[in-house]
């Protein structure tokens, strides 16, 4: 299992367009992929679950990836998130 922490940096929070793109990317992968905030989690392959997280600017979340292609999934999802939406929290 791979876990990475991020902080959401987009001014608009997690809205439909980036959530839909994340679902599209995650759905192409075999691994189980979840985003988790301090009080809830959502499957990255489900639009309504992601939207329900209501991630806002400067909110911390954790990416959980588990499965046969988890290294590939971590690279692809992390690249998508860090393009303009979130920054990785360095341990």
Image (cartoon, rainbow, N blue to C red):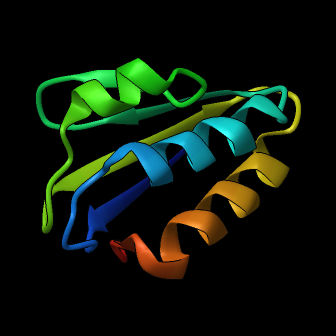
Closer to us: 74 or 55: 55
Quarter where residue 11 is shown: bottom left
Residue 42 percent coordinates (x, y): 39, 23
Vertical placement of residue 1 versus 9, above or below: above
Horizontal side of 91 relative to 24 (left or right) equals left
Residue sitting at x 48%, y 54%:
18
Quarter where residue 50 is shown: top left
Residue 33 percent coordinates (x, y): 59, 31
Vertical placement of residue 86 versus 33, above or below: below
Residue sitting at x 21%, y 23%:
40
Residue sitting at x 76%, y 47%:
73
Residue 47 percent coordinates (x, y): 48, 26
Residue 9 percent coordinates (x, y): 26, 74
Q: Is residue 1 visible?
A: no
Residue sitting at x 28%, y 49%:
61
How many marks the image carries: the answer is 0
Horizontal side of 49 relative to 25 (left or right) equals left
The C terminus lies in quadrant? bottom left
Q: Residue furthest front?
A: 17
Q: Is residue 90 visible?
A: yes
The N terminus lies in quadrant? top right
Quarter where residue 48 is shown: top left
Horizontal side of 10 relative to 59 (left or right) equals right
């Amino acid at each position: 299992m791979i876990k990475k922490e991020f902080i959401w940096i987009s001014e608009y929070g997690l809205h439909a367009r980036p959530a839909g793109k994340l679902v599209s990317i995650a759905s192409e992968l075999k691994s189980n992929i979840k985003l988790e905030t301090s009080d809830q989690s959502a499957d990255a392959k489900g639009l309504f679950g992601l939207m329900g997280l209501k991630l806002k600017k400067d909110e911390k979340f954790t990416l959980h990836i588990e499965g046969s292609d988890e290294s590939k999934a971590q690279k692809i999802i992390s690249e998508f998130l860090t393009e303009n939406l979130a920054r990785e929290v360095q341990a």
